[in-house]
Amino acid sequence: MESESIEKPEPTGWASKAWALLSAVRSQSPLIQCITNFVSMDLMANTLLSAGASPAMIHSIVEIPDFTPHANALCINVGTLSPDWLPAMKAAAELTCRTGKPWVLDPVAAGASGFRLRACLELVELKPTVIRGNASEVIALSKASVGPTKGVDSSHESTDAVDAAKSLSKASGAIVAVSGAVDIITDGELVVGAHNGVAMMQRITATGCSVTALIAAFVAVDPSHAFEATASALSVFGIAGEMGMKMANGPASLRMHMIDSLHGLDEADVLSRVNITGYR
């Protein structure tokens, strides 16, 4: 991790960094391999496309050796986890690490069952660059424990998981992001909060999955600064939600307008709206 190079965030500095990263995604169009759940594939792919990246929903273990080395980053989401898919996830993560590319883990409902928790912990051992989950998922991984959950929804606020996120980051070497009303990002020492987004985004399935894919795209274009890339992706996605909400009548129309807003974000939008601050 590059925590030594990260200075205490200044609002204008964060906004400029977020715009630079979004511009890089648009100009470079990184190829993002997504091994993800059936529910999220559509919104995840459209989020990546609207941001300027190139999604590939490749999950067959037969294709991993040929395809994965060509991806600029890998996103693994365990939402509809099954024993048949886990070997492909592991194989892709191992190959991505060997080729020096970044990969991002979304440990959906990590504490919901023993099988799911063990699978997530095994994936964490394969050194993800970033782990992005809700508070309950991050707490479950940090404690390595199964507990009561609300399915894929969190039973905790993101701010409840700051210590767990720092602990998980130190143990895994990954940047850890906790989604919530305030998105918490930590490298194990430094903690910042991204304050963008609207509550209605939680009423759209797969928004969390999609921002994980966006994080992968941002990290792909600047892998040596995964902390900044993660915080910037969360903020940019939240801005798209804020702008989309101005035109939306509910979750279904917000989904459409959020994708349109992400596609249309310009420099003025990003520089005026990014809200990333030091947390503590």
Image (cartoon, rainbow, N blue to C red):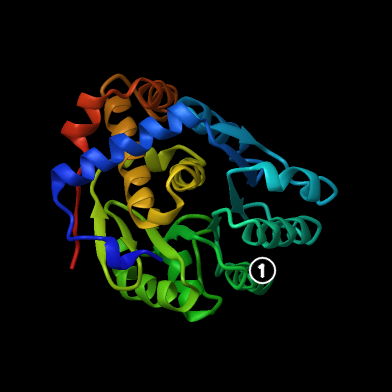
What is the quadrant of the N terminus in the image? bottom left
| Residue 115: percent from left, percent from top | 69, 71
For residue 124, say whether it is visible: yes
Query: In the figure, is residue 178 to the left or right of 190?
Result: right
- SS category of the residue bearing label 1: helix
Q: Residue tagged by mark 1?
A: 119
Residue 146, picture quadrant: bottom right
For residue 198, say whether it is visible: no
Residue 238, picture quadrant: top left
Q: Residue furthest right?
A: 62
Q: Residue at x 46, y 66 (%)?
A: 174
What is the quadrant of the C terminus in the image? bottom left
Q: Residue at x 33, y 50 (%)?
A: 231
| Residue 137: percent from left, percent from top | 48, 65
| Residue 86: percent from left, percent from top | 74, 60
Above-or-below relation of 39 to 163: above
